[in-house]
Image: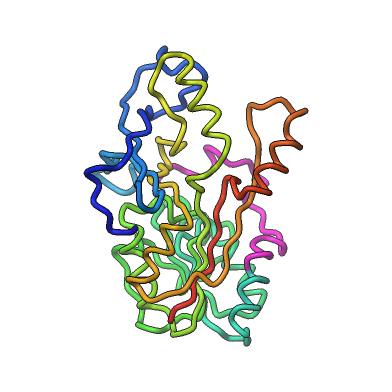
């Protein structure tokens, strides 16, 4: 993201390619080093788990990990992101939007309802097929393939979103560079990513140290669908100078709290909200 040499990056520990639980030493699997950039805070696996075929990572049918309710679109889906975007865009109906990693196409439906002319791309064959069959997405508007492989006309879109996608990309900076080429000047790119400053992994990593191990919980899950990176705001700020965009707006979301007693949830939420140590970082980037 920032171009810093990886030679002196900090090794945080090891991560198994499965759920580690509370006793990772009792499990078998493949472990990789989890590393943090000392310049911009990006956390990544080294080496990266590269599949022989993209469907090895993302071809899992959505029914295997989502309930039936997930296949129902609600008009409120993606609503807050759309509301923030239209204020940044000086929105007019008919503006063109692209959903990178469209999944079932629910965000496409919500943007279409708002008045966007919406396109999408989806690398997972099962999700692509469900978007067409269950959500009624127009096949002419949704491409099957990865962002790295597909092409759109230069300066075609007013808005591009990488929902819960950016952490899955092997070359996120290159993918963002490509998306910026498709974006009109003054257009907006929306990205939601796991934050490398999230508070809760720090507790779990400390717990693993107390057990006498060097395991860490960062980059969960390290199994399909893989998380390949956790991001710091500094990662985007550093990259903005190279690619010609500004971080127009950003915020952190606390999201769900797991494993801790419920009596502590209120305290943890307040602390994470006050210190920007929530699970998710959202950025809105404006093309210069």
Q: Which residues are magenta?
A: 57-81
User: Could you tell whether 16 is left or right of 248 in the image?
Assistant: left
* Residue 28 placement, left or right of 72: left
Question: Which one is nearer the viewer's eye here, 234 or 58?
Answer: 234
The question of residue 62 being in magenta is answered with: yes
Kindly identify the residue that appears in the image at 50 percent across and 62 percent down: 191
Q: Position of residue 230 (x, y in %)?
A: 44, 47
Q: Is residue 244 above or below residue 16?
A: below
236 up-or-down from 279: above or below:
below
**Residue in the foreground of this view, choosing between 287 and 128:** 287
Q: Residue at x 50, y 53 (%)?
A: 193
Q: In what quadrant of the picture does the C terminus appear?
A: bottom left
Measuring from the top left, give residue 263's x and y in whole percent.
Answer: 77, 28
Give the residue displayed 22% in from the left and 44% down from the top. Answer: 7
Q: Is residue 225 above or below residue 107?
A: above
Left or right for 158, reference 267? left
Residue 213 pos. (x, y %): 40, 17
Asked whether 83 or 264 is in front, the reply is 264
Q: Measuring 43% from the left and 60% from the top, which residue is drawn there?
A: 122
Q: Is residue 82 above or below residue 267?
A: below
Tell me the quarter of the picture where residue 256 sits.
Answer: top right
């Amino acid at each position: 993201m920032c171009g810093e040499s990886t030679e002196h990056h900090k090794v945080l520990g090891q991560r198994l390619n499965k759920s580690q639980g509370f006793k990772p030493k009792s499990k078998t699997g493949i472990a990789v080093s989890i590393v943090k950039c000392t310049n911009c805070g990006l956390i990544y696996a080294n080496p990266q788990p590269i599949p022989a075929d993209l469907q090895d990572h993302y071809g899992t049918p959505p029914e295997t990990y989502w309930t039936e309710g997930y296949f129902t679109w609600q008009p409120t889906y993606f609503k807050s992101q759309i509301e923030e975007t239209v204020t940044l865009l000086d929105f007019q109906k008919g503006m063109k939007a692209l959903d990178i990693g469209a999944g079932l196409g629910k965000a496409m439906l919500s943007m279409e309802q708002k008045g966007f002319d919406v396109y999408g791309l989806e690398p997972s064959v099962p999700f692509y097929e469900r978007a067409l069959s269950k959500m009624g997405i127009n096949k002419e508007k949704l491409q099957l393939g990865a962002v790295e492989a597909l092409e759109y006309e230069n300066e075609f879109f007013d808005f591009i979103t990488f929902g819960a996608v950016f952490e899955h990309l092997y070359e996120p900076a290159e993918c963002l560079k490509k998306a910026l080429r498709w974006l009109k000047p003054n257009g907006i790119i929306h990205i939601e990513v796991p934050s490398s400053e999230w508070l809760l992994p720090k507790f779990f990593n400390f717990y693993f140290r107390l057990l006498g191990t060097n395991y860490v919980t960062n980059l969960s899950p390290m199994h399909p669908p893989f998380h390949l990176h956790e991001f710091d705001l500094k990662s985007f700020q550093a990259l903005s100078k190279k690619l010609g965009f500004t971080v127009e707006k950003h915020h952190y979301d606390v999201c769900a709290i797991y494993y801790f007693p419920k009596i502590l949830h209120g305290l943890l939420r307040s602390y994470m909200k006050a210190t920007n140590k929530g699970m998710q970082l959202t950025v809105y980037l404006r093309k210069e």
